[in-house]
Image: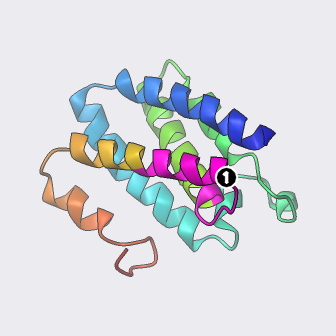
Amino acid sequence: MGRALRLSRQLRQIESAIGTLSAPLRDSLAMLTVKELANAARAESPHLYGSPPDRIYQTWGEGAEVGLERALSDNAQVRMRGIALWIAVVYHETENADHATLTSLHKQVLRLLRVIKESAGAKPEVYAQWGTDGRGEAA
């Protein structure tokens, strides 16, 4: 399961990139992550979010790789957008996986989402957005 191994390695890099962000940037990351998850959820193929349109018949797209590349940027804004994109794509790619490794990866992404949410502090505007699944429905 090469894809699962690649995503697991990328997850460690994403966690490291999150660790470099200051508290105010983590607040912004929480908001960006909510928006990216919502945008991906509204896409025709959420797991292909961030990929070129000609990739619609692929098992996975390029969104995770694009997100990781941005997450490794020296620019904090680009880094946050990349982290949020990576999380949104991998969340949807692993959401209904039937392979144990991908299911485990999905749980790790959920844990990462919880860490981001909690690092945003008790900001009501962030928590209000975390309560929906991107389509305006309760998660």
Position of the N terminus, as image quadrant, is top right
Magenta stretch: includes residue 96? yes
Q: In this rendered view, identify the residue nearer to me: 99 or 63.
A: 99
Q: Is residue 23 above or below residue 34?
A: above
Residue 78 vertical placement versus 87 (above, below) = above
Q: Residue furthest front?
A: 100
Please state the extent of the stretch shown in magenta in the rendering. 93-110
Q: Is residue 93 left or right of residue 19?
A: right
Q: Identify the secondary structure beneath mark 1.
A: loop
In the picture of the structure, the residue carrying the numbered disc 1 is: 50
Q: Position of residue 5 (x, y in %)?
A: 70, 35
Residue 138 in percent (x, y) is at: 34, 79
Which color scheme did the rendering employ for the protein?
rainbow
Q: Residue at x 33, y 51 (%)?
A: 31
Closer to the camera in the image, 127 or 31 = 127
On the rendered structure, is 58 left or right of 9? right
Rendered-image quadrant of the C terminus? bottom left
The quadrant holding residue 27 is: top left
In the displayed structure, 21 sits above or below 91; it is above
Residue shown at 68%/74% (left/top)?
Answer: 44
Residue 60 image position (x, y, % from top left): 77, 54
Q: Give the amino acid type for the residue marked by disc 1 in the picture.
A: Gly
Q: Residue at x 14, y 52 (%)?
A: 123
- Label 1 Cα crowd, 10 Å radius (few <14 / some 14-19 / many 20+): many
Q: Who's the residue at 47% across and 65% down the image? A: 38
Q: Main secondary structure of the magenta part?
A: helix
